[in-house]
Amino acid sequence: MHQYPTAKHPLNIAIAGYGLLGRLLAWRLLLLGHSVTVYDKGRSGSNTSAAYSAAGMLAPISEAAASHPSIYRAGTEAINTWANWCSELGLSHAIQQQGSLIVAHPQDRAELTQFYRDSQRIAAENTSMTLTMLNRQQVSELEPDLSNQLDQGLWINPEAHLDNRALLAGLDQWLQRTDVTIWYDSEVSVSPKQITDLNSGRHFQHDWVIDCRGAGARFDQPTLRGVRGETLHLETREVTLQRPVRLMHPRYQLYIVPKPNHRFVIGATQLESEDLSPISLQSNLELSSAVYTLAPAFAEARILEAGVNLRPAYANNLPHVSANEGLISANGLFRHGYLLAPLVVAQTLSILHGQNNLACEQLISQPHSEQATHEV
Amino acid sequence: MSNQTLTDPLTLYGKTFNSRFLLGTALYESPEIMLDSVATSQTEILTLGLRRQNPAQGDGERFWQMIQSTGCTLLPNTAGCKSAKEAINLALMSRELFATNWVKLEVIGDDYNLQPDPFQLLEAAQELIAQDFCVLPYCTDDLILCQRLREAGCQVLMPWGAPIGTGRGLLNRYALKALRQRFDCPLIIDAGLGAPSQACDAMELGFDGVLLNTAVAKAQDPALMAASFRSAISAGRDAYRAGLMQKRQTAHPSTPTIGQPFWHQNS
């Protein structure tokens, strides 16, 4: 078990938002000896956060190829951090590090080639990365339940995936054993050192306020937007996968992430929309047909859930931590919630402890905004 | 637009533009990169789609505000629509939302190559023009379809170079040249271009503009690619205006030999 130095000057800290960041920060801050109060607009056990809907992939290569190359280094460090965190929580099984398999249908081979090329660019600077092209037989040796129509695949390492729901539950249980106060049904506004409950109008004073409400903060931050994502949660005993499988397609990029108990998360759409209404028929068709073509045995899978949530994003789609005395905003994790959360947690703790964390600042850059008052 | 007199303006439905490059706003890694690419492209017309949003609830507003902040003319599209009825409904919604009667009319007939459905396209164009829309139709290079769209009242035609997102360039030069010869209205190559040389090629053939999205959005450096397309389109346009020389079977020296000493002439 790790030993934590207790803070010399314990702080009274408020956290707005009980999603992934809210839970992680509460955990780390309590370990450091601070006192923590959490405010969340959801009901107890309602699981409305994006972290609950997410697939829990730690895919630094795929994400760096699809978006910002700097995500790779932060993401590989995050895999190590998550492995440590899972073991500290007694949940070592909640992280699986078997890489990812990228596939494309024969008619879309150009998409796979493009991905290979984009990844090679990043691999050139990072010797820890391995990209292995597989033929039909090698694909079926790696993942025997995939369709034998797939004549090519790319196995990439290091990539990992989390049993994110077990992890969130593990953090909940850990926090329940402490004296943390969690106020549910509390829609709040944040200001330096102060939380205002919007229902009662009451003010609560703290040494620091950390705003990690995700897309919920978009009404206070004009540069933050929500990006709609839809997922399907399936259950079948007919398919077993060891690792996430990503399908490259000219118009959709979809993935299957295996979960315990014969469950799979299929995701995700990405729509510039803040609509939280149920999944559309078209999105359902796209996700379903993609998964069916990858492994026809999914045909008899049961659809347990169709998740819809908003990814919080700034204009550059990268996270941003900003602070002035008494208020920190940590937000904009977009579709990299689990991948970049360790970085955002580290940056937030550095600010609280009055340290500069250059490694974090390089990635967590200033978004297109007038957030001058919130500058780190 | 600046007050300077435009030497070679592009006129679409009575509106003049200095740039002949129309850019799409989808597929970028982030809105910030999209805005950077718009800036380097120096485009004055941006297309945007709202097919998969729920605009009745003010949905997607923040993303659109970023597009509107560029000051470009907005050209809402009907991407993803598969029937005249869907496209008409979406056009009506866009008109209300973006306060513009311009529409890039797109009715898709095939899921895999996203080929326009000419029959539904014509039907939608007729209806929208009757409702006072300025219709810029995304069409195939079929001469008769283009004639019918002109008869319906389209003042601009936007034939494809190749299927959307394929980056294959001008697949049917014969048909495209025929369109240029037969129509004096603005013709814009929409879709299928992957490289600036292909855009330059289209402009050299006499097309009035180029509309693209994927080739820029999916480049490793989209803003630089946008600048490259801008230069290529402008070079192609200048070449067309300057008049290309005719190809010949035999070589002609660029330096005349008359007047040279005879012992140099056979060297």
Image (cartoon, rainbow, N blue to C red):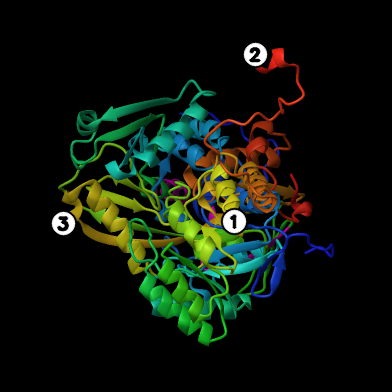
Amino acid tagged 3: Glu
Q: Which residue is mark 3?
A: A300
Element under disc 1: loop
Count of picture labels: 3
Indicate whether residue A184 is drawn in magenta.
Answer: yes
Range drawn in magenta: A169-191
Chain under callout 3: A
Dot 3 lies on which element? helix
The residue where tag 1 is placed is: B206
The foreground one among B183 and A241 is B183
Is there one chain holding both mark 2 and mark 1? yes
Looking at the picture, tell me which residue is in the foreground, A51 or B219.
B219
Circle 2 Cα neighbour tier, 10 Å, few/some/many (<14 / 14–19 / ≥20)? few
**Mark nearer the N terminus (2 vs 1):** 1
How far is the residue under mark 3 from the one under mark 1? Answer: 55 Å
Q: Residue furthest right?
A: B4
Q: Residue furthest front?
A: B262
Q: Residue at x 64, y 43 (%)?
A: B228
Q: Which numbered marker is on residue B267?
A: 2
- Residue B27 position in % (x across, y down): 51, 53
Q: Are marks 3 and 1 in contact (CB under 8 Å)?
A: no
Nearer the viewer's eye, disc 3 or disc 1? 1
Image quadrant in which the C terminus of chain A is located: top right
Judge whether residue B252 is colored magenta. Answer: no
Q: Are the residues flagged by discs 2 and 3 in contact, CB closer than 8 Å?
A: no
Label 2 and label 3: CA atoms lie apart by 81 Å
The quarter of the picture where residue A133 lies is top left
Of all chains, the one bearing label 2 is: B
For residue B251, the mark is none
Q: Position of residue A310 (x, y in %)?
A: 49, 60
